[in-house]
Image: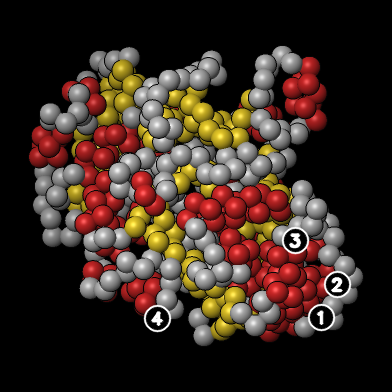
Amino acid sequence: MQGIWHWLDRRDLITPRRLAVVDGDRRFTYRELAARVRHLAAGLQRRGIGRGDRVAVLSFNRVETLEALFALARLGAIMVPLNWRLTPPELAVQLADSAPGLMIADAEHRDLATSAAAEARITMPLVLIGDEYEEAVRTPQEGNAVGAFDDPLIIMYTSGTTGRPKGAVLAQGTQLWNSLNIGTAIGLTYRDVTLTVLPMFHIGGLGLYALPTLHVGGRLIIQRTFDPEETCRLLRDEGVTAMFGVPAIYQVLLQTPAFQQRDYSGVRFGVGGAPCPLPVIEEFEQRGLLLQQGFGLTETAPTATLLPPEDAFRKKGSVGPPTLHVEARVVDDAGCDLPPGEIGEICLRGPNLFLGYWGLPEATAEVFSPPEQPDDPAASAQRASGDYRGWWFHTGDLGYADDEGFLYVADRKKDMIISGGENIYPAEVEQVLYQHPAVLDAAVIGIPDTRWGEAAMALVVLRPEARATAEEIIAACQGRLARYKIPRRVAFVDVLPRNAAGKVLKRVLRETYGKAGEG
């Protein structure tokens, strides 16, 4: 079956004059975009890139990132998106692991690219976006596209919230399934104009909703990096109909005058990446704005669940049922299904799942369980081959399903706190903290406790001009949480460390604040 490069070839035939991408003052029709991709593929091929080769991309959000992705898809090659927020030593780990044969970078990150390559002790050509890149785009087209549906397309390094990141390998076909999953969940069509705010080095920046928009023939608006005033201008001037963000983005937008003063009821807003604070959901509801909460991971490409529009506020706090081509279950430590309301690990199955972790067969095997009995000979043979299609992926996220099949995420399994034998799910405590009028942002971690083993500690960011004491924050939890769940300590911080998906880096918080507790 043909790879996703076929989308643009078909759009060139079906809707050649339709506007495909708006990137600043640059506008590209589907015919122009398809032609640039074909010529770029030829340019990369002349530079020695072929099937299975890796090409790193280090850039702000740009149309060139998407062009590179489709060009590599034509060649059967693999893109390695790099996080420009990382330091050279951090990027060097990913470069050494993936061993790319070439890097594409924008001018703003040229020094970071060269430093990271030197740190990784890798010698490879660097193609800068600008004249050098455009020269590659002008290469005469040659050869046929060879990339196939099952070919690896992306090595997306996981956020590393619990340690060293791993490279999740996503096949070309996963992006078709993601487009079908998210497209049906939000009703995406060729009439839509979508805004991409999330960084494209994150799977959300590609899959929510950049690639699905190009799949259905809609119009994609690219924002370099998130700036609330610029986001509001693009929503207004470009007639945006759908946008996906993480909770932190919507928290900022709700405080932005340009967002407060205009009617955006024509926009379908999606939110995910981290549990969304209930006050954010409620403020959208009060303003009559649709906000659909969902759940997904790098390994699921990324869409797994999403609240239907009609249930967006009836089921607030839920991340919805599984999308059309995804199955979900909640299991105990023995892998047995749990009844509604009981918390366990969320497991997912579907054709959108990743192929495995790059170069880490043992780590891959650890997160998959067979559809039938583990000792089944067929399952043993499949495990030996490294082919986990049809298997259950263990997400590492804890949650429960209600009696209608809607999922609720409690927390990361590794972030759960055990105090005196009782489980404390930080997300539950954080939702209570968000109810305090002075609290803008909050995170809860476990700290050592000589009596109970662990206790909860809250890290709180106050709203501008707001004042509160630790005693007031703790008192506000009284009557809303069981005593063992109430934070024993509160620390006030200016900002919480987050990754590109908006998830709080609790590992960093534990390293800073979790060394000593109270007796």
Residue drawn 66% across and 76% down? Answer: 15
Q: Is 109 displayed left or right of 135 in the figure?
A: left
Q: Position of residue 438 (x, y in %)?
A: 15, 50
Contact (Cβ within 8 Å) of mark 3 with mark 4: no
Residue position marked by numbered label 3 in the rendering: 73
Kindly identify the amino acid type of the residue bearing the numbered disc 3. Ala
Residue position marked by numbered label 4 in the rendering: 237
Quarter the C terminus occupies:
top left
Residue lying at the far front of the rendered structure = 310
Contact (Cβ within 8 Å) of mark 1 with mark 4: no
Mark 1 or 4: the one toward you? 4
Counting residues from the N terminus, which is met first, the one under dot 3 or under dot 4?
Answer: 3
Kindly identify the amino acid type of the residue bearing the numbered disc 2. Arg
Looking at the picture, tell me which residue is in the foreground, 21 or 513.
21
Counting residues from the N terminus, which is met first, the one under dot 1 or under dot 4?
Answer: 1
Mark 3 or 4: the one toward you? 4
Residue position marked by numbered label 1 in the rendering: 139
Contact (Cβ within 8 Å) of mark 1 with mark 2: yes
Q: With respect to residue 221, does 431 lie above or below? A: above
Mark 1 or 2: the one toward you? 1
Counting residues from the N terminus, which is met first, the one under dot 1 or under dot 3?
Answer: 3
Kindly identify the amino acid type of the residue bearing the numbered disc 1. Thr
Can residue 321 be seen in the rendering of this structure?
Answer: yes
Residue position marked by numbered label 2 in the rendering: 46
Q: Quadrant of residue 245?
A: bottom left
